[in-house]
Amino acid sequence: MDYIYDLETYPNCFTAAVGSVDGQESWVFEISDRRNDEKHLRQFLKKLYQNKDRMVGFNNVGFDYPILHYFLTNKNVTSECLYEKAMQIITADDDEKFNHLISPNKRFIQQLDLYLIHHFNNKARATSLKMLEFNMRSDNIEDLPFEPGRNLTFDEMETLVEYNKHDVYQTYLFYEKSLGAIEFREKLSQKYDRDFMNHNDTKIGKDYFIMKLEQEMPGSCYRQLPGGARKLNQTKREYVDLGDIVLSYVHFERPEFQSVVEWLQTQRITETKGVFSDLPEENLGELAKYSTMLTKKKKFKDKPSQEDLDEFYKEHPKGWVEEKVLKSKKISYYGMWRVAKNLNTVVDGFQFDFGTGGIHGSVESQVINSDDENVIVDLDVASYYPNLAISNRVYPAHLSENFCDIYQDVYMQRKSYAKGTPENAMMKLALNGVYGDSNSKFSPFYDPRYTMAITINGQLSLCMLAEDLFKIEGLEMLQINTDGLTVRLPRNRKHELDGKAKHWEEITKLELEEAIYTKMCIRDVNNYLAVGEDGKVKRKGSYEYDGLGWHQNQSSLVIPKAAEHALIKGGDVEQFIRKHTDKFDFMLRTKVPRSSRLVTIDEDGEETLQQNICRYYISKEGEKLVKIMPPLPKDPEKERYIGIDKEWNIKTCNNVKDFRWDIDYDYYIAEAKKLVDVLK
């Protein structure tokens, strides 16, 4: 049986709320000035241990269980002791937090952590239970009712108990939404006799691939040290010469692309991050002719002396000096120079931007349609980065060429399983996780040369395809991204595209997958809509509202829905929004740190304190929402007031019962029109 639980710790009050997932039983244990359930809690936990039950929580592996473990391994534990243990965990540095973790083989009771399963421990995906309550559209979003560290009154303890029970219920709701992920991990753990239960998706894929490598090449990923410890095998490099990693089949006819390859062949890098950004004109060589450049400047204090000029030109050999006459007739002098914000080249008006993560480029602010004369074609490379490594025998040096054979075996195994099966899903994760981990100093795949070989050749290979497609009369490049490109061309030239795609596949030994779009609405490379022949809509960036991740902000979804209604169906934004009946689609959320306060301010200037995580909607009859931040050192007496949606009035709606249909529709209409009008 699974039991959902959550702990709350204050100096004079500790509570543990628990509920069975079948909804039949629930408990609250308290150790405080007014109650001592220590004995009952020990008996309850012993029962879970004997029955081999599982405890489910949110960040319980990192916080709740270490406290319970401390409780179980010590006698006469007080609320103050438990609070001190909690503070040790909370205030620990990132490295020190690991010292508080209890390894799975030492836990008295199995732990399932929804926080870890969904990878919320990754900074880019960090999500609190309160944010999940917003995204789950919970009826009531409750933040911690009392400031941490204070002694509670008996009445406040009662409030804390209710809050603790609320968090358990919300964790249960998220548990229900996570059942697919849990069952997936249970099946994998059973099949491979390995504990995948608290692994995020990426870690599942990585660990599976490591398992396969170790089976075929024992000791390839880790080497055993005396005493039973193990150490990562990696390939660390002082530098990587990019000219050595360009594949032999890479060839271009156009100087715009040739100059990119020539530039790459002169580069020796000592790190993989930021190597393609802020490139001075003098360092680009011939590529500068074809790159989009930015002009930068710095002001001289006075008319520059020869010494000033010599110093400036030494730093910026292709720079120049400009004079500006002010209204006062005084002359200001500026040193000017050009840089490429990122490595790029412009071909027939289309800009190709190169990066360590992949290539990208897009037309902007356009609506493009397929019609009787023209068709939009999207070409994606199947499992691009894995197959690039497999086909060209590219591998982390310490793993040897056998890595490619095992990689291919995993790829073929995945194809043998139907989509939607746990095996197919896990092998997809295994295939895709290797490239990202090859740039991680904590991974057995680490080899910067491998990382750069894959990303650079991936980008150059797509550019080869693009160069050949540019030869088709009437073809327009619409987008290019990490693993594919999208074009619009005359229908009577489609056979030419098919032939060039097949030729590219023969050269690269890669496979292209084709999709036909009937319409694309493109704001930029990261924000667009694309409609397939089957009517399905692909949504990106600001136009997304369906299938959003739990870590993403799901505020005011009526806005992208209205924009899509207008752009795809030709409907009216204002009419759609005014007739929309889902109140949750109008709600927004904000969060302020505990060092700040969140208040509403009415027309008389009266402030009302709000909880730090707050749900609200835009209302004509509302108040101003303001974040109050601590003073800066230069003005220690003055708190900083920062308005949130400051041009509008809001009403808080943490309890959905507080919602009224007094919406200020003008806000939502204006925001939706921004997504529509930019494309007209």
Image (tube, rainbow, N blue to C red):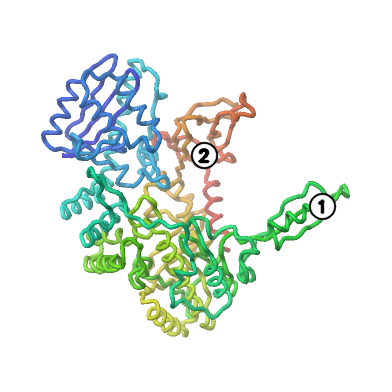
Does any portion of residue 125 appear in the rendered image?
yes
Marks 1/2 in contact by CB < 8 Å: the verdict is no
Position in image of residue 295 (x %, y %) = 68, 59
State which tag comes first along the sequence, 1 or 2: 1
Image check: 61 left or right of 456?
A: left
**Residue 190, image x, y percentages:** 16, 52
Compared across the picture, whether 673 is left or right of 39 comes to right
Q: Nearer the viewer, mark 1 or mark 2?
A: 1
Callout 2: SS:
strand
Give the residue at x 13% y 30%.
47
The x, y position of residue 497, in whole percent, is 44, 81
Measured along the vertical axis of the image, is residue 517 above or below residue 48? below
Give whichever of 442, 627 is nearer the camera.
Answer: 442
* Residue 569 in sight from this viewpoint: no
- Residue 648 position within the rendered picture, expressed as x and y whole percent measured from the top left: 57, 40
Q: Which mark is drawn over residue 619?
A: 2
Instruction: Work out whether residue 16 or residue 654 is closer to the camera in this orientation and state it.
Output: 16
Secondary structure, mark 1, is loop
Residue at x 79%, y 57% (from the top left corner): 322
Q: CA distance from mark 1 to mark 2?
A: 61 Å
- State whether residue 200 is above or below residue 394: above
The N terminus sits in image quarter: top left
Which residue is outermost to the left? Answer: 50
Residue kind at label 2, given as amino acid type:
Ser
Dot 2 surroundings within 10 Å: few (below 14), some, or many (20 or more)? Answer: many
Q: Which residue is mark 1?
A: 305
